[in-house]
Image (cartoon, rainbow, N blue to C red):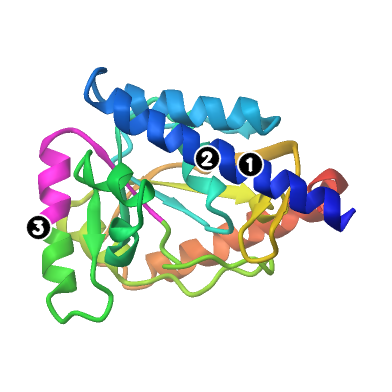
Amino acid sequence: MKIFALINWIYATIVVLISLALMIILYYILPKPYSRKISAKIIKIATFISTDIKGKEDPDTQLFLLNHQSDLDIFIMEYISSKDLAWVAKKELFDIPFFGLALKLPKDIAVERESKMALLSLIKDASRVLEKKRTITMFPEGTRSTKGKMLPFKSGAKIIADKYKLKVQPVVLINTSKHFNVKKFHAQSGTIKIIFLPSFIADKNDDNWLKNLRKTMQEVYDNELTNNSSNR
């Protein structure tokens, strides 16, 4: 089984790299955000991943907040969303071949986590993408968590949501690391469940809304695993 999972991982990685290269080429040919959507669809089909969506995307959402387990999360979100997504990612990712260019071309948001100016830069860049009617998309944990427990959410999401009174929609991805895990060199086909939670307007007077949101998203995640054995 481990050998089969490794072979699947190598195959899936090749698919991702080819799709990213195609996305970069198509970026100069097609209007935004179609190059990303096509790339995401290719990855989904070629890796034999299906999606099971619960809830609906709010067309007025300005900020998506997702839990993060796998590199597959980005492609799944691009595939299921009709919106032009502006991803927030650590600056180091912008320097990775292919993947970094896929972030740079659409002018996504780079964050220097150790920089004192990072939050000011995030606020400025958020304003830039919002003016272009793009939807900011963040992993508030800041990094992958693959053990079923979401990490504490970083304050950046709350700062920009409060600053611009954004309409926020949380999205819970179920067990994506089971289908593509870089650290374990593991990949497998199957169905990924995505749950759109109700959207809301950020309230800067509520100091705990982001902390409470993490708790809600974790409860939704845990309930899904408890009540649906196919997701375990």
The amino acid type, in three-letter code, at marker 2 is Val
Task: Tell me which amino acid carries mark 1.
Answer: Ala
- Residue 76 is left or right of residue 28, and the answer is right
Label 2 vs label 3, nearer the camera:
2
Q: Secondary structure at mark 3?
A: helix
User: x and y percent of residue 201 in the render?
Assistant: 30, 48
Report helix, strand or loop for mark 1: helix
Who's the residue at 70% across and 30% down the image? 48
Q: Residues within 10 Å of mark 3 (few under 14, many from 20)?
A: few
The disc, 2 or 3, on the residue closer to the chain's N-terminal end is: 2
Asked whether residue 33 is in view, the answer is: no
Q: Residue at x 36, y 46 (%)?
A: 98
Judging by the rendered image, the residue that carries numbered circle 2 is 16
Quadrant in which residue 84 is drawn: top left
Report the Cα–Cα distance between label 1 and label 3.
36 Å
CA distance separating discs 2 and 3: 31 Å
Q: Nearer the viewer, residue 139 or 54?
A: 139
Mark yes or no: residue 128 visible.
yes
Give the mark nearer the N terminus: 1 vs 3: 1
Packing grade of label 1 (10 A; few <14, some 14-19, many >=20) is many
Residue lying at 45% horizontally and 29% vertically, measured from the top left: 39
Magenta residues span: 124-138
- Say if 134 sits above or below 112 in the image: above
Look at the image and say whether residue 2 sits in the magenta stretch.
Answer: no
Mark 2 residue element: helix
List the residue tagged with mark 3: 124
Q: Is residue 67 left or right of residue 90?
A: right
- The residue at which mark 1 appears reads as 12
